[in-house]
Image (tube, rainbow, N blue to C red):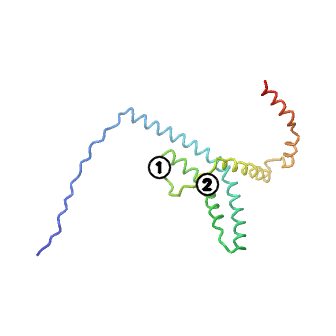
Amino acid sequence: MDHQPAAIYYHQIEEPELEQEPPVQKAANRLFSVITWAILFVLLAVWAIVGAFFWIPLLLRAMLRFSLGLVQSVFVGQRPDGSARILRDSVSFYRRGFVVAVETVTREKIDGESKEDPQTGNRLLLELIWAVPVWYLILFAMGWIQASPLDLWNWFAEIRWSEMLGSLIDWVRT
């Protein structure tokens, strides 16, 4: 008996013709796309500055925490996995800001990373409270700021708070 394989025939399936967009709508969509990418470019430029403002102090804190975790792990005999995760997250913080901005605008997933746990609303305030003194100390160490922390404290202490609060209370009463 002679067995021949069954013949497979391929037929091209005709796709229905897609409706063409009217030229005005096509131009409007193109204009919308150009405006969207222009705004994204501006926002990415702003993120480049704002992200760096938060990223550098975040890196410093993560490196300090990892170093202390490493010392502790040597004494205890465990791996500093928690500190290492925080260091990895801190290193990728700046890049993730760009990725999130582009993903949000294009609605396409660029990065295959897992989503982080939701953070509390106070996280931004805490990072700001950390970043401002760190940048002050960096700029002071570089000589770009001449006022020492003691000078700032003296200036703050010399403010006549009672007069300011009294005038504020009088202003609110009227």
Seen at 64% across and 60% down, the residue is 86
Q: Is residue 154 left or right of residue 25?
A: right
Q: Mark 1, residues whose alpha carbon is within 10 Å: few (<14), some, or many (≥20)?
A: few
| Residue at point 70%, 54% (across, down) | 57
Residue 39 drawn at (x, y percent)? 54, 40
Residue 150 lies, in percent from the top left, at: 86, 49
Along the horizontal axis of the image, is 11 left or right of 158? Answer: left
Q: Residue furthest top?
A: 174
- Residue at figure coordinates x 68%, y 54% from the top left: 56
Quarter occupied by residue 29: top left
**Residue 135 or residue 174, whichever sits in front:** 174
Looking at the picture, tell me which residue is in the foreground, 83 or 35. 83
Q: Which residue is mark 1?
A: 108
Q: Residue at x 57, y 50 (%)?
A: 98
Q: Can you identify the residue that label 2 sits on?
A: 93
Residue 58, quarter of the rendered image: bottom right
The residue type indicated by label 1 comes to Glu
